[in-house]
Image: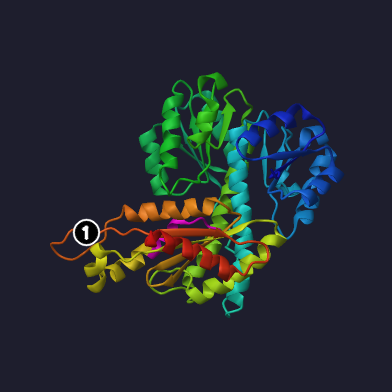
Amino acid sequence: MDARVLIVARDDGLAGRLADGLGKLDWRCVIARGPDAALAALEDFAIEAAIVDVDGLGAAGLSLPPMLKAASQPQRLPVVALGAGDYAYDVLGFDIALTPPLHPVQAALRLEALVRAALAEEEFALRQETFAARGKHLAASEPFDRPLGVLTVGEPTPRFLALSHALKASGTEVTAAFSAYTAFDYLHDRPFDAVILWADDNPQEAMSIASGMRRNTRFYHTPTVLCVRGEAEINIADAYQRGLSDLVLTTTPETETARRIGALAKSYRREASIRRALEQARSSGLMDSATGLFTRDLFAAHLHRLAQAAPQRRRPLSVAVLRMPERPETANLRAEGWIDRATPQIGSMIGRLVRAEDTAARLGPDVFALALPATRAAARSAALRIAAVISCTAFEAGKDRTPFTVDFDVGAAEISPGENPALALERAAAGAFTRQAS
């Protein structure tokens, strides 16, 4: 199997354990001992992210990000610093800094977020080209005009207050909540770039807040950091799977904890900025007026550009088709125009349910399509999840009539190297039609 992550480290002590753990989570790794070996690995494998052991490599490791990023162009390669040193990692070109010991689940979650942000940046650059060809300019998102904002949740113990002071000293605005109820009130009231959960004597209450945030689409991507007295108090893997972004011990120096939280908050800001930039397409005047999705012709042009860029970036590309089938039980609803009335809401739901880096289009009255970069077999699963959410939604059918639901026939296909993307789209559509026929 091809490696996805490059780990640059002098020895296997730290790198070997991390590589083993990530491999079990489908993030297969290759280890390079230095800059030359790292560059060779980038040529041999379709690397999606790099982790640099800056403590073990010293100055050579600190100078790697520009070199690795340049060698990966036109792909955007996230580079993670793994070390405890107090360096200006973002100035050196690192996307984020993590402090050992690093749990594999924590690393996998951070890699997933970083790779998605890189994909979104690549998508924005291609989308700029597609829209420029039609006389529309998509500008990069304006920087946020407010300082980083962090919400701290927990009892006001001396260590809790010391961390708040360390964050404020770094220029971060800190809001304190002393209960879960107050915390969610604050979260609904204004945006935060990170949330710190002070577990102290009750780690389960803190974890319930993290889980609640993961169940809310508004807070899903907001970084959450759990402060605990000892790792034995919780199941670390379970904590990360339930939505935790980082875990620190209460004995960790406040300046180190503040630095780690600041790095997560800045990374979140970057992702939010990319999403804002991509959303400009909705107001371009080129989108489908009813649904806000790409029109058929705009999608065809953009898919062609995506297909050309995918092999250059050494990434797969898949397409999916969702077709609202002809059913006897919906014939009257269709004839009376109720399905047409529901289509704008359906299209809007599809637009919200896809990833920022995906492209959703309306190809016809009842046919929708998705272009999913860096995706293979998961394309069909993604389309099925979208169809499942929509099938659970009730749509208005007129006065004194029971609301109706709609379902989709789904097909998906990966675009092969050199294949005309229109043919791949036809293969995906054929899959949807085949299901209807069966």
**Where residue 420 appears, x then y in whole percent?**
62, 70
Residue drawn where x is 70% and y is 58% of the image: 313
**Where residue 7 appears, x then y in whole percent?**
74, 39
Location of residue 209 with respect to 359 vertically, above or below: above
Residue drawn where x is 63% and y is 72% of the image: 129
Please say whether residue 303 is visible from this viewpoint: no
Q: Secondary structure at mark 1?
A: loop
Q: Is residue 300 magenta?
A: no
Please say whether residue 221 is visible from this viewpoint: yes
Residue drawn where x is 75% and y is 55% of the image: 72
**Where residue 78 appears, x then y in whole percent?**
68, 49
| Residue 31, picture quadrant | top right
**Where residue 177 appears, x then y in whole percent?**
43, 35
Q: Give the residue at the far front of this rendering.
A: 438
Magenta segment: 347-357
The residue that mark 1 highlights is: 403
Q: Is residue 122 left or right of residue 89?
A: left
Which quadrant, please, contains the N terminus?
Answer: top right
Which quadrant, please, contains the C terminus?
Answer: bottom left
Location of residue 106 with respect to 138 vertically, above or below: above
| Residue 237, picture quadrant | top right
The secondary structure that most of the magenta stretch takes on is helix
